[in-house]
Image (cartoon, rainbow, N blue to C red):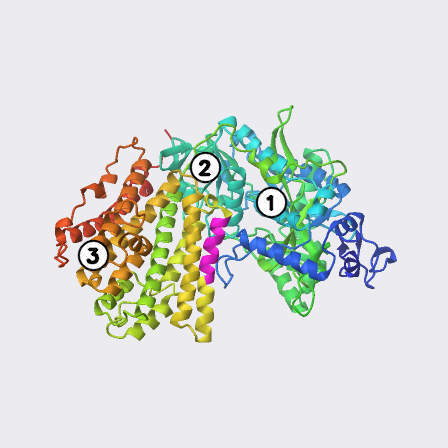
Amino acid sequence: MAARARECTPETGHYDELRGQAGAPDGTVADGVAPGAVLSGHWQQFFAQSDAQTAQEMDQRFASLQRQIRDNGVTYNVYADQEGPQRPWSLDLFPLIVDAKSWTQIEAGVLQRVRLLEAVLADVYGPQNFLKRGLLPGALVQGHPGYLRSMHGVVPAGGVHLHVAAFDISRGPDGLWWLVGQRTQAPSGLGYLLENRLTVSRQFPQAFQSMPVQRLAETYRALMESLKALSPAGADAHIALMTPGPYNETYFEHAYLARYLGLTLVEGSDLIVRDERLFLKTLQGLVPIHGLLKRVDDQYMDPLELRADSTLGVPGLLQAIRAGNVLVANAPGSAFLESPALLGFLPALARHVLGEELKLPALATWWCGEQSAMKEVLPYMADHTLKPTYPGSSIHESFDPVIARHLSRMELDAWAGRILRQGEEHTVQAYLPLSQMPTWQPGSAALPGRMALRSTVLRVFAVSDGRGPDGKPRWRVLPGGLARVAGASVDIASMQRGGSSADVWALSESAVDTSPLLTLAHQASLPTKRKRLVTSRAAENLYWLGRYTERAENSVRLARLTLECLGGEHQTSVPLQQWLSHMAVNNTLVLPGVPSAVQARRVFERSLVASMGATDGATSVGYSLRALKMAASTVRERLSQEHWSMIVRCEDELFSRCREHTARGDFSVAAALRVLKTSSDYLAAITGAQTDRMTRDDGWRLLSIGRHVERLAFLAGALERALELGTLESDGGFEAMLDLFDSTITFRAQYQQSRDIAALTDLVVLDLDNPRSLAWVAHTLRGRLAKLAGSPAGVLCPLSLKVPAPDSWDFSSDWERSGELLEPVTLLELLRTLRASAFNVSDEISTTYFTHSGETKQSLGS
């Protein structure tokens, strides 16, 4: 494989990470070394320790990596993606390897810069001496929409503004690292780089163990300890991770990071401010929150003082921050630091504040809001990169960065005109040919894969490390990072532009701590055992996850039963056809206007098959599976990886197979039954994960309650309608009911080939040993409701009493023992009561646990 690496050549002027030299115009590399030159020592070691040496073996490794990404459900949401809201995370096979000397330089430069940025924030929101002395332009600070006047004069909890900062750097043709940009609001990547490390290290275990790759876990633990120590509650602080929700592009890493660090994942609607303190709304009431690791942009944090249209924030949050009652990482108000124009003013600030030259230089930057800078750079604009001064702003002009050398003369003139008219909106930055790292481009059955060099940008993170002996804030640099890799013939490394990511191996000159990544980081959980909290939002989503899981099972079973019966030996039974038609329409497997099976059996069949993969109109099996996945996605941090993967695969398998059959025009009943069988198998696994592998906390109880509410309403309604239509009087109807209750084997074991309706109802209504009987469902539901309400053992709560107690059910007088069927009045009344009680319980659960109608008042002060 090293021989293949030597065949790769970088593009002209780009630094070659493989050889540690820059490419030359003649296709050689610097100093006249040919493309086949010896690789850098660490890359030689990497390829030597890799047990995959052929292209075919690397293709297998790449396929294994992609499969692991899919199985782990790692996604990166792209809002404009036409294929849906979620797509698999893109990860390259090879890591970016940074030698020990380079990493030491990066580390020193990043630590210096985060100290400088902290000093800037302390001054800007304090005495503002930098503005008064002209060291910072007011237009880039107070004129920036990310500057929050409401935070002026506020010393954040713990006295630290920045707890997590990200710096995007790249190596230039000279081999030096240059700062390209910085992120301080809510930097992304801390979760993805963990997944990258776990995934890539498993593909190259020998190389990872033999090379001195610095480990990550200790830094995450330091961050958690720092957040607790600096928070108002100290070591006993309750820290939460605040996310915009499942539709955010990086939601996967929010859930992943929350689970990894042991944080409560919350949305703005989960939180409430009372008496200048922040609380989490849970099933047990309000629980204090002492710290937030936020992934929500500042402007959305508080609709009372910032964006009034925000539904992501918490009314009154800024007042709680001003009162010092909650630590927020990072403190709101740092967004102006992300302006590329600010980079040009930091060298002078470093000399003024730190008395030092910056160790990690930034690319030369000109803010065109200064006339002198604009006049200086306009004649040379074609050799630079154009960037918006206020990226992402809704009140300033914003655009994607533009590499001017790719523009035509007419386009350059147009940009020059825009800059002349709105100079302050534009920033010009020196163009840097990004260094290029090796990537693996997979092959096909006919052509093996190959190695190729791609441009890359490295994101490095500095995280809070408490306070030093002198009382000053400390930071440490995460030893590694997130590499973003550009696509072919592209020199902008952006995930939104189809780029990829890579793991980053920062090498050490000394021995490294080889403690397991997951084990060590999980020690960052609270030292004392804390009962896992269930937010009201999570509780509601878990409840509906239970309902949709059961509803999906019911839809699959009913669809399969209907198709089998309509093509079986009892297909001419009118009561059976009537019952199946009613059940299909009532459960929206077919549209109400479709002729019933009695009127046009084949039309009815085709309509049911055609609706299986639909998500509008007839809300059939596909609709239920999609609703199941959407509910699960909102509580993903509470589900095991296998559980989530099974849900995703179940939904994907049904829709893909339905599309394939529809496109080929061969979506027959037989094909539909095969699809339903696959869905049934997946749902059985999903049910097993929910039953056997979830902790029995209040969240699980609500999930279970949701399942039993849905089951009670569905089965009671099915039996009620069958009795009304006389369906059970026929052999086909009798067998169909046993099948729907999943009790055929049990019935035959107890009653052989009997067709006694009293025996059937005894099994599916009264038998407390049958988990599909109505009595078992009602009994279990009553117990779960009591446990949820916190009732003592053996004592039922008022909500439990709304479900009729099985020991009070008696309809024996409805059946004449001679075998003649009498009108089952009492049984029908019971079934109607059970169905109504299921809906009543559902409404009351929503009012009691989800709505919080009594907690709508939000206090900003005492």
Q: Indicate which disc, 1 or 3, sits on the residue closer to the N terminus.
A: 1
Q: What residue span does the magenta drawing correspond to? A: 642-653
Would residue 128 be visible to someone looking at this image? no
Q: How many marks?
A: 3
Q: Which mark is residue 520?
A: none
Residue 315 found in image quarter = top left
Q: What residue is pinned by disc 3? A: 757
Check the picture and name the quadrant holding the N terminus. bottom right
**Which residue extends farthest top?**
469
Residue at figure coordinates x 13%, y 52% from the top left: 814
Kind of residue at disc 1: Leu
As measured in the structure, the alpha-carbon distance from the residue carrying label 1 to the one carrying label 3 is 59 Å
Q: What residue is pinned by disc 2? A: 318
Q: Indicate which disc, 2 or 1, sits on the residue closer to the N terminus.
A: 1
Q: Nearer the viewer, mark 2 or mark 1?
A: 1
Secondary element at image label 3: helix
Residue contact at pointers 2 and 1, CB within 8 angstroms: no
Kind of residue at disc 3: Ile
| Crowding near the residue tagged with mark 2, few <14, some 14–19, many ≥20 C-alpha atoms within 10 Å | many
Q: What residue is pinned by disc 1? A: 194
Task: Pinpoint residue 459: horizontal percent, then vertical percent.
Answer: 64, 47
